[in-house]
Image (spheres, helix red, strand yellow):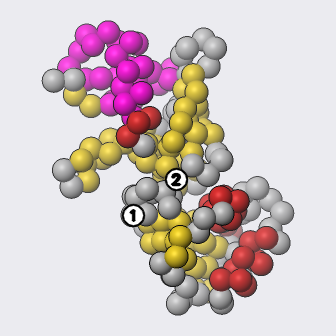
């Protein structure tokens, strides 16, 4: 399958998030797709600049046995992912100043809650914050958003413990040690 065939298959899908978990098509090799740690999507080492195309692809993304694929009813294409397919680039706090809504680079907003948990993971020398986005697919939180969440947690807690805890939707999320 070439890129134009994949695009045609994706464009024919009507649902916002089709049931990719039900689709088990044959693997289509030779198509090189990648998402880098800045949230950029690539096809054969060329950046995909059209946001609508990336959003469309993100809707047919599937995680299967630790590997990512773009899946249509007839074929699946492997996608190399450096950190996570989604990048959290912004956030909102509700009017009560208690609940946080995270916004991804791919036009998806998710509550920071029990179903969309935040977790710090050590990768190399860095602790990187990840959040569950959908269907076992994760997003990583951009540095600027993470620093803003730290500020919110400091205001919530007043720095009274050795761990910085962020509260949202009656859940507590560890943002690391305060040392």
Q: Residue at (48%, 71%) from the top-left corner? A: 34
Q: What is the span of residues highlighted in magenta in the rendered image? A: 146-175
Specify few, some or many for label 1: CA neighbours under 10 Å numbering under 14, 14-19, or 20 or more.
few
Q: x, y (%) of residue 85? A: 50, 58
Q: Please report the residue visible at 50 percent of the width from the left and 23 percent of the height from the top.
A: 168
- The percent coordinates of residue 127 (x first, y second) are 27, 44
Residue 59 seen in the figure: no
Q: Is residue 151 magenta?
A: yes
Image quadrant holding the N terminus, namely bottom right
Question: How far, Cα to Cα, is label 1 from label 2?
Answer: 11 Å
- Read off the residue under disc 2: 86
Location of residue 101 in the rendering, given as x and y in whole percent from the top left corner:
58, 31
**Residue 13 vertical position relative to residue 165 in the rendered view, above or below:** below
Q: How many marks?
A: 2
Rendered residue at 64%/73% (across/down): 71
Residue 151 appears in view? yes
Which numbered disc covers residue 148? none
Q: Secondary structure at mark 2?
A: strand
Q: Is residue 92 left or right of residue 87?
A: right
Q: Give the image location of residue 99, x and y in percent.
A: 56, 22
On the picture, is 74 further left or further right than 39? Answer: right
Q: Which residue is identified by label 1?
A: 82
- The answer to whether mark 1 and mark 2 are in CB contact below 8 A is no
Where does the C terminus fall, quadrant-wise? top left
Q: Which of the 4 image quadrants contains residue 163?
A: top left
Q: Is residue 107 above or below residue 23?
A: above
């Amino acid at each position: 399958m070439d890129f134009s065939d994949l695009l045609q298959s994706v464009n024919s899908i009507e649902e916002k998030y089709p049931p990719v978990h039900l689709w088990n098509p044959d693997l289509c090799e030779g198509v090189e797709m990648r998402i880098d740690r800045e949230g950029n999507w690539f096809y054969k080492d060329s950046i995909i600049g059209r946001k609508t195309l990336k959003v469309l692809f993100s809707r047919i993304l599937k995680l299967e046995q630790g590997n990512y694929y773009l899946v249509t009813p007839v074929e699946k294409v492997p996608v190399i992912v450096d950190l996570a397919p989604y990048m959290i680039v912004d956030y909102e706090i509700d009017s009560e100043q208690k609940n946080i809504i995270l916004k991804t680079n791919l036009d998806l907003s998710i509550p920071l809650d029990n179903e969309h948990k935040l977790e710090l993971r050590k990768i190399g020398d860095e602790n990187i914050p990840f959040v569950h986005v959908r269907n076992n697919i994760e997003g990583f939180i951009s540095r600027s958003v993470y620093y803003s969440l730290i500020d919110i947690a400091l205001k919530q807690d007043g720095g009274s413990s050795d761990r910085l805890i962020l509260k949202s939707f009656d859940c507590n999320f560890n943002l690391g040690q305060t040392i």
